[in-house]
Amino acid sequence: MSNIETMQRRRSCRTYDPRPVEPEKLAELRDFLLSNHTGPFNGRLRFQLLAFDEMPAEETRFLGTYGVIRGARCFILGAVGRGPQAMEDYGYAMERNILKATELGLGTCWLGGTFRRSGFAKRFNLSEDELLPAITPVGYPGERRSATERFFRFSAGSDQRKAWDELFYDRDAATPLSRESAGPCAKALECVRIGPSASNKQPWRIVRTEGAFHFYLCKTPLYDTFFKDIPLQNIDMGIAMCHFELASLEIGQAGAWTVAPTIPPEDWEYIASWVARR
């Protein structure tokens, strides 16, 4: 599959089939995790695939997800060094892991607040200057969704996305960008629109100017109150950057991330800009 096809195919999966993932797929995924250690802001990242079947049964008791995930026997864990834009780097890199798992035919689900962070952090040997922002289960999707999964999807509106005129703008924050005006880059913007985000809030806002796309965070008030060291919506911005970059490169719209001085619109926080290569 192409990257765009993989993004279109990806769905959050909370119920897993008990059949094990083939060793060759796990090996391929592990190799990818080892190679995936850099984000757009050059944060220090590391990832690990944790397979319950390779652990003593008593150790798995401390690795729970509060009933949100059913049947998963593998998880991808990740750590990022504390620092500016650490969450954006983490969201960008972890989403690449998730897309790789999707390409292999496996299900995943971003978990930012519904897992026992201390248990997974201990298993991952997290250092004092590292954070474990989020994890994902990995495995084959179950044939039927559990009642818990149906509730989460309904409450978050997981099958719905904001309209274009709420997310993408032309030259300023007052002029919506239409699909037609976006030209070839409409595909990359659509890949951002369908991307996953915490509680499906879709906090990204993008303004197109001559030769660049500027990414802003429109925070949901009080959303990150319970996770002050791990602002989930900054992770969402990294996911959006990942989708936009991979899709842009695939359609031949090469560019690079840069941080440029800019005055953000009211209630928006500037994150980064994708500048086209000439």
Image (cartoon, rainbow, N blue to C red):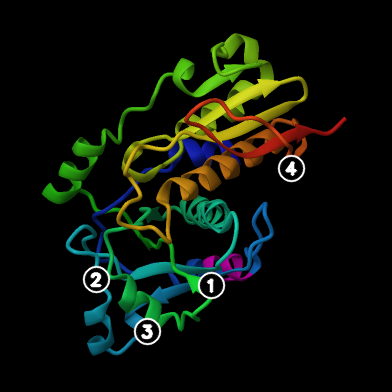
Mark 4 burial class by Cα count in 10 Å: few <14, some 14-19, many 20+: some
- The range drawn in magenta is 29-34
Q: How far apart are marks 4 and 3 (CA)?
A: 42 Å
Q: Position of residue 82 (x, y in %)?
A: 55, 67
Mark 3 burial class by Cα count in 10 Å: few <14, some 14-19, many 20+: few
Mark sitting earlier along the chain (1/3): 1
Is 96 drawn above or below residue 52 in the view shown? above
Magenta residue check for 30: yes
Taking the spot 57% from the left edge, 14% from the top edge, the residue there is: 177
Q: Residue 64 carries which label?
A: 2
Mark sitting earlier along the chain (2/4): 2
Of the residues shown, which amino acid type is indicated by label 2?
Gly
Q: Which mark is residue 54?
A: 3
Q: Which is more foreground, mark 1 or mark 4?
A: 4
Q: Name the residue under label 1.
A: 27
Q: Quadrant of residue 276?
A: top right
Q: Distance between the residues labelled 1 and 3?
A: 13 Å
Q: Position of residue 57 (x, y in %)?
A: 24, 87
Taking the spot 50% from the left edge, 81% from the top edge, the residue there is: 127
Q: Where is residue 153 in the image (x, y as percent from the top left)?
A: 23, 40
Q: Quadrant of residue 81?
A: bottom right
